[in-house]
Image (cartoon, coloured by chain):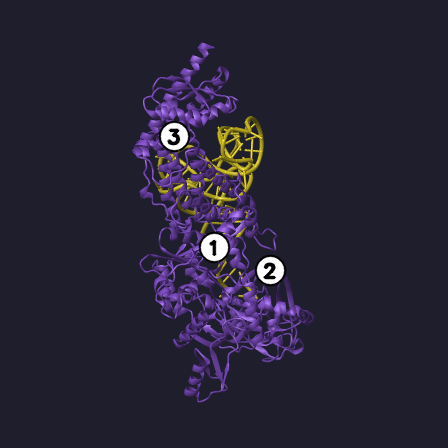
Chain colours: A purple, B yellow
Amino acid sequence: MDLPKHYDPQAVEPRLYARWEQNGYFHEEPDPARPPFIICMPPPNVTARAHLGTASTFTPMDVLTRYHRMLGENADWLPGVDHAAIATEAVLVKELAREGVRREDLGRNRFVERAWEWSRTYGGAIDAQFRRLGFGPDWQRSRFTMDEGLSAAVVRVFVQLYREGLIYRGTRLINWDPGSHSTISDAELEYVERDGQLWRIRYPYSKDDSSAGVEIATTRPETMLADVAVAVHPKDPRYAGLIGRSVWLPPLFDRAVPIIADEAVDPEFGTGAVKVTPAHDPLDYEIGTRNTLAMPSVIDVEARITGADVPVGPYVGLDRFDARARIVDDLRRLGLLIAETPHRHAVATSDRSGDIVEPLLSLQWFVKAAPLAAPALEAYRSGRVRFVPERYGRTYEQWLENIRDWNVSRQIWWGHQLPVWYTSAGDEVVAESEQEALEIAQRTYGTRELTRDPDTLDTWFSSGIWPFSILGWPKKSAELRCWYPSQAMITGGDIIFLWVARMVMLGIHFMGKVPFPDVVITPLVFDAAGRKMSKSLGNAIDPLELAERYGADAVRFSILRQMRLESQELRYQESRAHEARNFNNKVWNATRYVLALPEGLPRAMTLPQPSSLTLADRWILTRYRDTIVRMGNLLDEYDFGNAAETMWRFIWYEFCDWYLEATKADVNRATRAPVLSYVWNGAMRLLHPIAPFISEEVWLALPHDGETIVTANWPDPLEVPTFESDAREFAALQRAVERIRNARAEMGLTPRDHVALDVPANVPEEVSALLVLLTSASIERKGPAGESIGDAFSQIGVRTPHGLLAERYRKQAAQLRSEIDRGEKKLRNEAFVARADARVVAKEREKLEGYRGELARVEAALAKLKESA
RNA sequence: GGGCGAUUAGCUCAGUUGGGAGAGCGCCUCCCUUACAAGGAGGAAGUCGCAGGUUCGAGUCCUGCAUCGCCCACCA
């Protein structure tokens, strides 16, 4: 076999992936005879491209699916794509703008057609990227949130919730995103700290005398036009006498508003008096509702001043920010602007468009959240849904406790149109089809004149039913029976509210069961300097570029290796991929060594009789079995970082550095081929979920069973013989080797310069042979026998020139004396001896004895050295 | 304002139930030894953020503080 010296992932990865997919290794059919292992892929936006954060969230899903498939479970990773209503619409509107066309010019039908076309053309981009990274979801089952089946499920859910009274239409204060020209839900708000102004403004008692009045503080003077009251705290002594009086509303002075008392006012902030604008502020809306105040609007959907409800004078038609500037100027001129101070505050912005969100009163559709939230809370509190890391559960809990009704109607065209029709009289008809709507309208209202609601549903409405809609719900499919609920949900912490909580709520409501028992939250990706990775910062790393340079296995391995179970961040830099590439090369070259053994590898994977196994064989088998057990535990706990690290250490530092070297000794030659073949084959299977490509390439080159490692069996620890005491002996040998190498280096000898070793007589021949190999030393003389083998190991010594040796002994003696000193001090401490665990004390005594013995030996050696000098 | 996380070697991080401070990278020295220089061997390097407390004993438990970060929240 003639393999190149360097592993070339580019030559291997695409070839293997194509084979996997063609042979359908990722595909599964529901099989009630085996335990299911299902992961529903969080559907990436149709507009999305993979970045490092995507890679860090999706790689664990691939790892788990591959692991459970190898365990023989009915494992399937269900992929899909989200239509991403607002994001896609924004892309299209922009594209149209370049052609000089507005959405309205095109018309709804043609616009939606174009969105479909766009989705088909560009929507597959991330799938190709996933393939490049080695992800193996069941592509044959890929779904799109807008496809026929899912759309039908969405309609069914909407209609059922409506009929249960859990969806209603009403005028409420909603978040208006002027950028996307639509409402957005509370969960899509992002509060961004910005520098603004806080203006203190006097509302005079009399329209003719501006010198006396109540001073209020505001950051948004443009909303003054819609003020309906001034509110103070009921217990605020400054205003006690003023409650019930009224003040005139500047700058137009066309009406007076009352001074009212409300608990919500913070007397500490500003002047302790607040203007109340129910139509344009969430807190004011509450105050307005409590006090049954009028709710005029002065800002429209274009974020311009409108005079539809109240007079707005010269400000009509102005943009909200222009109006703000004009009003401030006018107040200043009127002498009513008392103060203007810089003020940093959190401004609600749309996390989609980035525009400042405008609270507006609007007639919209809402999901009644409380009845759905209660069971979702209970599911968490009873442990039927748990979070990893645990602390994210509290985030989920707090949100559900304070949940508000969910505004689900959007004023965009790309998405699921509401299954809602209106009669000319304004009666609403909710039905699964136009046909059904007409029948209901005829029956209930005696009309067949219906207009359909133009709004579409929030994207997260369809994502919320993802765990069962993709299984064919509402049809009673085999998939639904076998694969709901899934076994784990893996996603980013940023969508616990937007998505996870809603899946739990809707899953319980429609399926009667939580959609998944475990929610694994993956970390955010930062650069090495601790800055969030983002395009705008210019520190983003493209995982696909990394894959081109270092291979997909290296990308995956390096990401996983940086993951820490409890950490909310993952720091990454390109050098990590470089290291992982080196690791893969190590794997490759170890394979070259194994395949090039002159005696060849046995065809069958059977081990020699235990009695014929050498010390090194027994050690690596023992370590191999420990590694299998550990890997299983770590993957079961979602501890991907330690799992990756465990494979790294086992393969590089145990298998390659020690076992492989040991097989070069003559004493190991009889058994090495079967043991190498056995362990290396198993190691590749353990490695496969993490580095699917190289493990497959190597596994196929070794003696193996089956046509692919993808469906090979996960190693069974119970089938691996272990030899605990031999393993300990080998570990003692390792320490001896390290000691000798160290001594040699200190003497300034190169590996070619042979050193002479004093080896006690009772050190077995086999061990001596290993020693010689691992240290390129020769055994010149056998010293006196040690009491035990372990003792004998510690007595193996290097023959060294006098001066160097004396120096070394002195150093050693000094170190030992300090250890002895520490131990003695501890044992002189009566409290320690009396109160500490007896085993700890005994261990301490033992250590002290050991040190004393060693010191005696060293001192004797030193004395002898002096004598002979 | 509230909640949560982090702080250990120059960098990124381990340190399971309290009992002699660890790894990788980087750095320095030596070695192209017939799997691998994308490699091997060795080495230097830390007041475990600060201050208290509990304990025979604290990187580990408790309290406070500092710095960085994440999430939530109606200070207009």
- In the picture of the structure, the residue carrying the numbered disc 1 is A58
The nearer-to-camera label among 2 and 1 is 1
Residue A839's disc is none
Question: The residue tagged with tag 2: helix, strand or loop?
Answer: strand
Residue A128 or A318: which is nearer the viewer? A128
Question: The residue tagged with tag 3: helix, strand or loop?
Answer: helix
Q: Are marks 3 and 2 on the same chain?
A: yes
Residue A668's disc is 3
Q: Earlier in the sequence, mark 1 or mark 3?
A: 1
The three-letter amino acid code for the residue at tag 2 is Arg
Marks 2 and 1 sit apart, C-alpha to C-alpha, by 34 Å
Judge whether A630 appears above or below A377 on screen: above
Judge whether A777 appears above or below A521 on screen: above
Which residue occupies the extreme bottom position in the image?
A446
How many other residues sit within 10 Å of disc 3, few (<14), some (14-19) or many (≥20)? many
Q: Are marks 1 and 3 on the same chain?
A: yes
Kindly identify which chain the residue marked by label 1 belongs to: A
- In the picture of the structure, the residue carrying the numbered disc 2 is A194
Question: The residue tagged with tag 1: helix, strand or loop?
Answer: helix
How many other residues sit within 10 Å of disc 1, few (<14), some (14-19) or many (≥20)? many
Residue A600 appears in the rendering: yes
Kindly identify which chain the residue marked by label 2 belongs to: A
Measured as percent of width and height from the top left, residue A382 is found at: 34, 59
Marks 3 and 2 sit apart, C-alpha to C-alpha, by 71 Å
Residue positioned 32% across, 31% down in the render: A612
Which quarter of the picture shows residue A404?
bottom left
The three-letter amino acid code for the residue at tag 1 is Phe
Q: Earlier in the sequence, mark 3 or mark 2?
A: 2
Judge whether A707 appears above or below A463 on screen: above
Residue positioned 42% across, 31% down in the render: A662
Residue A852 or A770: which is nearer the viewer? A770
